Image: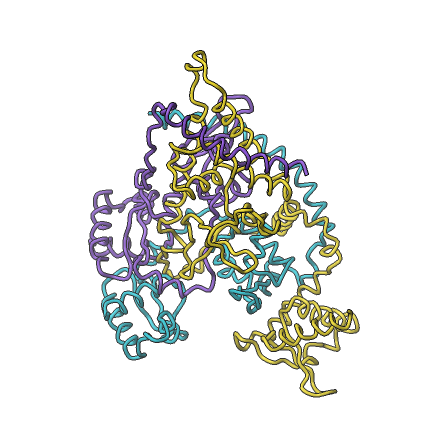
Chain colours: A yellow, B cyan, C purple
C-alpha cells in the first residue's frame, strides 16, 4: 500500500531525486555496492527491496541492464540480456511470486526471441519481422515515458517550488464554511477503513475512543507551553472527580503514549514525584539498555 | 543583497496567511546569514510605504506584521467567495475521520492508511477551521507533527466528548447502509456522464 | 476609477489563493459597472510588469491569472511551513506522463506501455488531485474509461497549455535491423554464454 511512496528518495533540499537510481544508491546491509555482485548473492530481503523499489517493471529492469552495459537499445545482445534478466527473475521468483508474474512474461518473450535467433535461417523466414523489433519498440517507448516522468518530476510545482500569494481579506471570516454532517464524516471513515481493511484488526476494535481522547489531552498538557514539551507532574494528569473509571482511562492513555514512545516518564528519586516529559534521547537510550539487559537475562 | 532581503520578507508576508513577527522572519534565513532585527524592521516599513495606494496594505498587529487586502475594496473582494461551492472533498472528510479516530496521528500515517498523499491544502483547511491541532512531534526521523481533534470540532458536531462518537461497529453498519445507496447513485451518475462525455469528445476534435 | 479597478484586481489576485480568469474578475463588479475584458487584461499586464524585481510575480496559468511568490526565493519561503510537501512516486509520474502525452488513454493502454499494472491508488491520487479527468469510454469490449489531463494539472505545474510541457525524447528509428551483422555477433556471444545459462537452469530445478 505504501509502495507508491517508498520509491522516492528525498534529497536534502527537499526535492525528489528523479534521476535514474544507480547501483551506488543501493545499500545492502549498510554497505554501498559498486556493482551488483556477479554471483548475485544478495540476501533475499534486500533484493526484494531493490526490485520493488528500484524497478518499475520488466521494461525498467531490462533498460537498466542495457544501460549498465552502455549499450544502445538498437544494439542489445539478446543472449546476454536474457541471461542477466533470468538471474534477476529467478531471485524474484523465490521471494515474491506475485510480483514476478509480469517479469516472467517478459522472460518468456526474451527466451522466445533468443531461440528464434539461434534457429538456422531459411529463405521462408526472411519475410518475418525481426523478433527483436517489437521488444525494441516497447523498450524505446517505455524509455521515452520514463524520461518524460523524470522531466515532469523536475518541473517547478505547487507546494514544493511555487507558493501562492494568499493574503488576509477583511471580513473574510463571514465567508460561509462548508457544512458537514456527522453522517458524512462517518461514511468517509467507514470507506477508508474498508479500503485499509482495518475492520479486521481486533486491536483497534477493542480500543475505546476515550483513551485516544485522553492521549490527546495528555500530550496537550505537555506541549501547551513549549514546543519541546515541559515536565508535567504525573499526579496532575488525574482528576479524582472523574471517579475510578476516569483515572483508569488516564492511566491507560499514559501507558499507551509511553508504548508509542510519545512521552517519557521520569522519577528523580525513589518515592519522589513522577513526571512525564518529552521522550528525550536519554530515556530512549535507557530503554534500549533495559531491553539489552532483558535479552541477556533471557539467555 | 538588500533587494533580496526585501523580496523574501515581501514574499513571506504574502504567502504566510498569518502575521509574522520579526523573529520568525529572521528564522527564514540560515543561522550564519540572518539579518539584524533593524534591517528587517526597515524593510517592513519600506514595504508598508510602498503599499500606499495599492490593493493591499502592510499592517502591524499584536502577533506581528501582516499583509491584507485594503479595507476600502473589501466589498469587491468578498464576492470572490460567493460562488465557491460549500462542500468538502471526500479526501478532506477521510483525513478528518482518521484524525478523529486515530489521534495522535501524523500526516505520514494518514497517507499510509489512505494509500494516497494528503495535500497541504487539506491540512491547511482543517487548521483554519480549527478542527485539528498540533500535538507536538513524533520522535522519529523528520519529527513529523502529530494531530488531534480540537474542542471546536466537538462543538461543531454537538458532542461533549469524543466518546460520544459512534463506535466502529456502528460505523460499519452505516457503511453497509451507505453502500447500497451509493451503488444506486453511481449507476445514475455514470449513465449521465456517458452522454456528456461524448459531447466533450466531439468538442475536442473540432 | 481606473486606479480603483487596478487595486481591486490586485487585491483579488492576492486574496484568492487560486487562479482567477477574466470572467471571474469581471464578476467582482456589479452588473451595471463591470469593466470590459480589455480593461481587465490591460490591468493584469500592468500588474505583471510592476511585479518585476519584487517578491511576487503575476503569471498566467491554464485556468487564469494568479499571484505567486517569486520562484527564486522559494527556498526561504518554504521554511515558513512545518510540513514537507507531498511526494510523488516514479510509478505515479510515469502514469501521469502517459496520460499527458497520450491522452485520451485507457488504463489498459498505460499498463501495456509500462509493462506493469497501474495500482488503483495511483489512479485515485490523480483523481483526487483533479489532475486527470474522464473523457468518456473507448468503444471496445469492456468500454474502458479514457483519461486526459485537467486544467488543474497544468495549474499545479504553473503552465498555461499542454504545449508548454517538456518535449518528449526523440526515438531513434529502428529501421531495418542489420540482421547479418547482429546475428553473427550474437551467435558468438551465445556459444560463450550457453554454459552460463545452463547453470541458471540447474538452479531453477533445485
The image position of residue A28, as x and y in percent, is 55, 56
Q: Is residue A109 visible?
A: yes
Q: Is residue A176 visible?
A: no
Determine whether C31 is above or below B183 in the image.
Answer: below
**Is C120 on the left or on the right of A133, as rendered?**
right
State the quadrant of the N terminus of chain B: bottom left
**Is B159 on the left or on the right of C109, as rendered?**
right
Quadrant assignment, res B107:
bottom right
Determine whether A272 is above or below A261 in the image.
Answer: below
Determine whether B116 is above or below B15 in the image.
Answer: above
The image position of residue C192, as x and y in percent, is 49, 34
State the quadrant of the C terminus of chain B: top left
Q: For the point 26% across and 67% down, which residue is it?
A: B4
**Is A272 on the left or on the right of A27, as rendered?**
right
The image position of residue B141, as x and y in percent, is 53, 65
Quadrant assignment, res A282:
bottom right
Q: For the point 49% across and 26% down, which residue is it?
A: A113
Amino acid at each position: 500500500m505504501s509502495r507508491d511512496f517508498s520509491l522516492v528518495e528525498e534529497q536534502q533540499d527537499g526535492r525528489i531525486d528523479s534521476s535514474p537510481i544507480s547501483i551506488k544508491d543501493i545499500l545492502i546491509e549498510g554497505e554501498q555496492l559498486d556493482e551488483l555482485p556477479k554471483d548475485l548473492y544478495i540476501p533475499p530481503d534486500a533484493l526484494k527491496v531493490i526490485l520493488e523499489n528500484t524497478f518499475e517493471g520488466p521494461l525498467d529492469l531490462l533498460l537498466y541492464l542495457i544501460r549498465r552495459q552502455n549499450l544502445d537499445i538498437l544494439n542489445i545482445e539478446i543472449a546476454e540480456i536474457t541471461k542477466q534478466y533470468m538471474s534477476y527473475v529467478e531471485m524474484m521468483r523465490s521471494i515474491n511470486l506475485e510480483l514476478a508474474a509480469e517479469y516472467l512474461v517478459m522472460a518468456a518473450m526474451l527466451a522466445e526471441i533468443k531461440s528464434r535467433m539461434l534457429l538456422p535461417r531459411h529463405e521462408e523466414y526472411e519475410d518475418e519481422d525481426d523478433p527483436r523489433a517489437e521488444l525494441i519498440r516497447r523498450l524505446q517507448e517505455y524509455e521515452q515515458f520514463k524520461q518524460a516522468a523524470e522531466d515532469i518530476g523536475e518541473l517547478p510545482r505547487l507546494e514544493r517550488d511555487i507558493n501562492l500569494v494568499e493574503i488576509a481579506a477583511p471580513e473574510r471570516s463571514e465567508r460561509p464554511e462548508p457544512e458537514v454532517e456527522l453522517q458524512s464524516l462517518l461514511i468517509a471513515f467507514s470507506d477508508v477503513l474498508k479500503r485499509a481493511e482495518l475492520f479486521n484488526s481486533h486491536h483497534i476494535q477493542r480500543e475505546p475512543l476515550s483513551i485516544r481522547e485522553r492521549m490527546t489531552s495528555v500530550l496537550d498538557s505537555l506541549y501547551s507551553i513549549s514546543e519541546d514539551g515541559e515536565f508535567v507532574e504525573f499526579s496532575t494528569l488525574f482528576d479524582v472527580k472523574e471517579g475510578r473509571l476516569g483515572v483508569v482511562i488516564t492511566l491507560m492513555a499514559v501507558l499507551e503514549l509511553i508504548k508509542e514512545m510519545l512521552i517519557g516518564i521520569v522519577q528523580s528519586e525513589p518515592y519522589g514525584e513522577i513526571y512525564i516529559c518529552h521522550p528525550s534521547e536519554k530515556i530512549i537510550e535507557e530503554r534500549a539498555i533495559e531491553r539489552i539487559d532483558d535479552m541477556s537475562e533471557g539467555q | 543583497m538588500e533587494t533580496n532581503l526585501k523580496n523574501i520578507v515581501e514574499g513571506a508576508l504574502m504567502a504566510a496567511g498569518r502575521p509574522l513577527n520579526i523573529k520568525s522572519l529572521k528564522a527564514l534565513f540560515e543561522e550564519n546569514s540572518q539579518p539584524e532585527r533593524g534591517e528587517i524592521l526597515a524593510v517592513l516599513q519600506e514595504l508598508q510605504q510602498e503599499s500606499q495606494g495599492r490593493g493591499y496594505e502592510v499592517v502591524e498587529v499584536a502577533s506581528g506584521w501582516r499583509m491584507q487586502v485594503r479595507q476600502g475594496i473589501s466589498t469587491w473582494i468578498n464576492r470572490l467567495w460567493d460562488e465557491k461551492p460549500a462542500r468538502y472533498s471526500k479526501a478532506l472528510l477521510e483525513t478528518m475521520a482518521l484524525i478523529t479516530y486515530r489521534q495522535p496521528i501524523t500526516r505520514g500515517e494518514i497517507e499510509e492508511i489512505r494509500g494516497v498523499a494528503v495535500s497541504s491544502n487539506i491540512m491547511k483547511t482543517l487548521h483554519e477551521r480549527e478542527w485539528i491541532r498540533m500535538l507536538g512531534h513524533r520522535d522519529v526521523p523528520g519529527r513529523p507533527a502529530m494531530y488531534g481533534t480540537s474542542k471546536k470540532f466537538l462543538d461543531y458536531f454537538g458532542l461533549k466528548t469524543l466518546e460520544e462518537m459512534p463506535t466502529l461497529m456502528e460505523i460499519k453498519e452505516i457503511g453497509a447502509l451507505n453502500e447500497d445507496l451509493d451503488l444506486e447513485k453511481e449507476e445514475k451518475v455514470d449513465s449521465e456522464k456517458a452522454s456528456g462525455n461524448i459531447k466533450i469528445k466531439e468538442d475536442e476534435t473540432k
